[in-house]
Amino acid sequence: MRKFLLLFIVMLLVWLAWVQVGRNLEWHEPDSALDISESITPYSTCERNIVGIQPYMVSTDYLSSKHFFEKLKTYFEAAKREGYFKNNTVVLLPEYVGTWLVINKEKTSVAEANTIAGAMAIMVLSNPFSFVKSTFNHHNESDFVAATIFRMKCETMASIYGNAFIELAKTYGVTINAGSIVLPGPSLKENKIITDSSQPLYNTSFIFYPNGKIDQHIIRKSFPIKSELPFVSSYPIEELPVFDLSIGKTTVLVCADSWYPQSYDRINQLNAEVVLVNSYCAGNNTMAAIWNGYDGISSPSDVDTTDVRKISEREAWIKYALPGRIKNTHAVIGVNVFLRGELWDLGTDGQPFFIKEGHLIPTEKSERAGIWSICF
């Protein structure tokens, strides 16, 4: 019994030591991986413009607030050098760009894990007390572990995300739709993003202004996909807000929301002129693969079922998402950007869509990071 007790104490001490070590990531200058900067409507005069940024994020970019901010700053600096930032500029970033802040201040082995499941396992083992505490706030999500981890880290995530985009908006004098971030019960108080761990998790997006203010209207995803449904809740599309931005009346759709006619019905109700979409397409080379149909919520009645397993994923995006459906609205401009990078075993794909007056505008292709500006 004494030997067993001694062994247990030794193992406990080793585990406690392991929990604490490996949390300080050595500073390294961020690599933007930027291979394309393109003005797709090179007007001599530009009254309004949207700058779409396709960042190339790697898991270590999320281990510290400094790494996250400095990585994003490389794209804003590049856009500034190109002369894309003007008096009436709105910057669009992709879905989930803030979500992986869930690993902030975690062990470097979390970022270096081969799989997202492995990364989550390390987080649970290295944060046992915080994890157990957060389990009491669960909201009956079927993916109990993922939901608990996001609740465990939500305050830190919201703080870093909010502070980074406030600073970027003020520094560069632009309005920013800051992609999306998964948070429980998000709200705003005194210009800070507040979370409520007792509430459902939402895939959430925010608007940041050049004066450092965050718009009080919060965008929440209405049509989560299959991989999100076990822990992310849907929000009524009837609550989709409209923003009076310098580029005109603007709505923001989070990825899959752009695939449903209900979104465009709402856009028409709001008389929006501009539609912004932030997206994440999982899997490498997914866009060239065969389309397997709608993912998560049932497909709308206007979908041609013979297209399933016949056309490519990209062709489906063009037909059934923003490029095809914006024609059913009065909006004249649509922009959709994607997150790219190296994020465990998730994979990424996608190229931006720029639509003007119903026409899809050709753009240069970027295999990693890219910046595009459209004037109108």
Image (cartoon, rainbow, N blue to C red):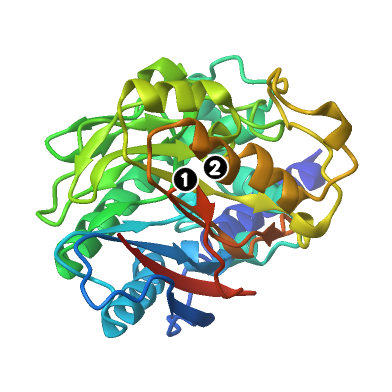
The residue sitting at 35% across, 76% down in the picture is 42
Q: Specify which label sits upstream in the sequence, 2 or 1.
A: 1
Q: Nearer the viewer, mark 2 or mark 1?
A: 2
Residue in front for this viewpoint, 229 or 322:
322
Left or right: residue 315 compared with residue 359? right
Q: Position of residue 262 (x, y in %)?
A: 52, 20
Judging from the image, what secondary structure is the residue with disc 2 in? helix
Q: Is residue 197 visible?
A: no
Residue neighbourhood size for the residue with mark 1, other residues' Cα within 10 Å, grouped as few (<14), some (14–19), many (≥20): many
The amino acid at mark 2 is Leu
Name the residue located 69 percent from the left edge and 22 percent from the top edge: 302
Quadrant of the image for the C terminus?
bottom left
At 68% across and 60% down in the image, what residue appears?
349
Mark 1 = which residue? 277
Q: Mark on residue 122?
A: none
Residue type at tag 1: Val
Q: Is residue 91 left or right of residue 343?
A: left
The dot on residue 322 is: 2
Q: Are the residues tagged 2 and 1 within 8 Å (C-beta)?
A: yes
